[in-house]
Image (cartoon, helix red, strand yellow):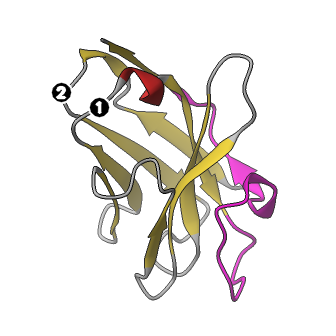
Amino acid sequence: QVRLVESGGGSVQAGESLTLSCKASGYSVRRNCMGWIRQAPGKEREGVAFIERGGGTKYALSVKGRFTISKDRAQNTLDLQMNTLRDEDSAMYYCAAGRIYARRCSLEPDFFTYWGQGTQVTVSA
């Protein structure tokens, strides 16, 4: 059974940093596509970043240059380093995993098969 558990959310001031982490069980972070998706109140889900099996990454334009997605193979975790946070980054952030051994990756939320429960990030201007 696949289980994804996020941690690291919180409340910060604009310009500060946070690191989100997602612990996976029953699923290989190293061998699959994983991503971070966020949803703010009243808005649609937005793909933030993904990392492919081979380590390639892609970011939403709104976070490119500020956020970094990475895998810790030893811990089987997925991380999201968020720097220079803005109030518009406030949202619930979800760790998401693609279908096992899927050949491609995507920022589209509907691509992902497995989801964590989410962790809240609140940025005050």
Q: Quadrant of residue 83?
A: top left
In depth, the one of 74 and 22 nearer the eye is 22
Mark sitting earlier along the chain (2/1): 2
- Looking at the picture, does residue 46 appear above or below residue 68? above
Q: Label 1: how many residues lie within 10 Å, few (<14), some (14-19) or many (20+)? A: many
Screen quadrant of the C terminus: top left
Is residue 49 a member of the stretch shown in magenta? no
Residue at image point 74% right, 18% down = 42
Q: Residue 11: horizontal and vertical position, in percent?
A: 32, 13
The majority secondary structure of the magenta stretch comes to loop
Q: Tell me the kind of residue under disc 1.
A: Leu
Q: Are marks 2 and 1 in contact (CB under 8 Å)?
A: yes
Is residue 103 a member of the stretch shown in magenta? yes
Q: Tell me the kind of residue under disc 2.
A: Glu
Dot 1 lies on which element? Answer: loop
Q: Quadrant of residue 108?
A: bottom right
Residue under numbered circle 2: 16
Residue at image point 39% right, 57% down = 77
Q: Residue 109: horizontal and vertical position, in percent?
A: 73, 53
- Looking at the picture, does residue 14 appear above or below residue 32? above
* Left or right, residue 23 beside residue 40: left
Q: Which residues are magenta?
A: 98-120
Residue at image point 62% right, 24% down = 40
* Left or right, residue 94 beside residue 113: left
Residue under numbered circle 1: 85
- Looking at the picture, does residue 103 appear above or below residue 113? below
